[in-house]
């Protein structure tokens, strides 16, 4: 499995929000603190808002904050919010129609089991666990 840049940035932003107790945080602050390009982060944050993981308010005093407790947000939630349903091979998302072996493929049960195990592991880890590790703190400056 390859963790996409969108997932990486989503985890960074969410960890920052989880560590921030002062309420709403502006996107410029998150981008700067987590070393994430602001235009790209804006797209990621829209996905997180759409998934109900983050709430946003526009205008003066606006910003982002977690929509629910960090203990109730799993890594699976984050992955699926920004990348969509997780698949290992194209046929797991209905994209196997082009495959001539789809009806007799012996690999499908193996890939399905691997996918299930990965989803189970991602479901076990929460945003709160990242926060408790101190990963919500800004990275050290580059030398």
Image: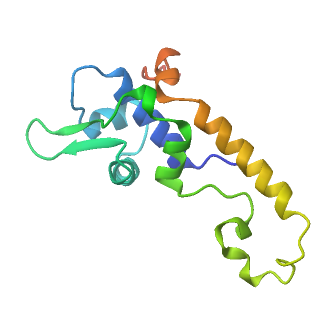
Q: Residue 69 at what x, y percent from top left?
A: 36, 28
Please give the name of the residue rendered at 54% of the width and 47% of the height, measured from the top-left corner: 79
In the depicted structure, whether residue 31 falls above or below residue 107:
above
Residue 111 or 45: which is nearer the viewer?
111
- Residue 38 location (% of width, % of height): 35, 46
What colouring style does the render use? rainbow
Q: Which of 23 and 137 is in front in this view?
A: 23
The mark total stands at 0
Residue 78 seen in the figure: yes
Q: Residue at x 53, y 41 (%)?
A: 8
99 lies left or right of 138: right
Work out whether residue 96 or residue 8 is closer to the camera in this orientation and state it: 96
In this orientation, which residue lies closer to the viewer: 136 or 126?
126
Residue 142: tell me if it is visible.
no
**Is 2 placed left or right of 4 in the picture?**
right
Residue at the spot 50% in from the left edge and 49% down from the top edge: 6
- Height in image: 89 above or below 103? above
Relative to 13, is 7 above or below? below
* Residue under the point 44% across and 23% down: 136
- 102 left or right of 96 in image: right
- The percent coordinates of residue 97 (x first, y second) are 72, 82
Q: Residue 60 falls in which quadrant of the image?
A: top left
Which residue of the protein is positioned furthest toward the left in this rendering?
60
């Amino acid at each position: 499995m390859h963790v996409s840049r969108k997932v990486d940035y989503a985890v960074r932003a969410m960890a920052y929000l989880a560590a921030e107790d002062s309420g709403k945080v502006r996107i410029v602050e998150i981008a700067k603190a987590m070393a994430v390009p602001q235009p790209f982060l804006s797209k990621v944050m829209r996905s997180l808002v759409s998934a109900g993981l983050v709430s946003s308010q526009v205008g003066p005093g606006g910003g982002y904050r977690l929509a629910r407790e960090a203990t109730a947000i799993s890594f699976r939630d984050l992955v699926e919010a920004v990348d969509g349903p997780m698949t290992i091979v194209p046929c797991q998302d209905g994209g196997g129609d082009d495959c001539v072996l789809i009806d007799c493929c012996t690999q499908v049960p193996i890939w399905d089991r691997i996918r299930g195990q990965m989803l189970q592991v991602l479901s076990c880890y929460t945003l709160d666990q990242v926060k408790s590790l101190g990963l919500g703190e800004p990275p050290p400056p580059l030398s």
